[in-house]
Image: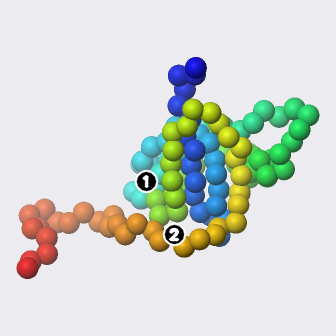
Amino acid sequence: MSSQHIYKILFVNQGKVYEVYARKVAHGSLLGFIEIDELVFGERGGVLLDPAEERIKTEFEGVKRSFLPLHSVLRIDEVSQRGASKITAYEGNVMPFPSSFVAPPKGDAGPQS
């Protein structure tokens, strides 16, 4: 069994859902972004090629690290094996989690009742 962690990241980009696999995921040094590093794709040179995975592999070719806006991330899972990366149509009614990126001023007790 491999001791390497693999993460499946689902995010929305330009009206489509991207499913990618990476070895490193962290909150980025940029406020409001998730950082994914070391993207993992299937091996080239095999007899069978998955056109969906080839498309996403081409799109991320030469990318060392990606910063995803926090509101575009749908889900991050730690998985035991890499699956096929793909791009699918965005279907459903997913509402972004409401959040504030601005910390309240020090000494602010919050809303008064």
- Describe the element under mark 1 as helix, strand or loop: loop
Residue type for callout 2: Val
- Describe the element under mark 2 as helix, strand or loop: loop
For mark 1, what is the residue? 30
Q: Is residue 90 left or right of residue 107?
A: right
Q: Position of residue 8 (x, y in %)?
A: 57, 44
Q: Position of residue 63 (x, y in %)?
A: 66, 45
Q: Which mark is residue 94?
A: 2
Q: CA distance from mark 1 to mark 2?
A: 25 Å
Q: Position of residue 70 (x, y in %)?
A: 46, 59
Q: Is residue 10 left or right of residue 44?
A: left
Answer few, some or many: residues within 10 Å of disc 1's Cα (few below 14, many 20 plus, some between 14 and 19).
few
In this view, which residue lies farthest toward the right? 47
Q: Compared with residue 54, is residue 68 higher up or lower down, i.e. above or below?
A: below
- Is residue 64 visible from the viewing direction of this image? no
Q: Which mark is residue 62?
A: none
* Earlier residue among tags 1 and 2: 1
Residue type for callout 1: Leu
Residue in the picture at 87% in, 32% down: 46
State yes or no: discs 1 and 2 in contact (Cβ < 8 Å): no
Residue in the picture at 51% in, 58% down: 73
Quadrant of res 43: top right
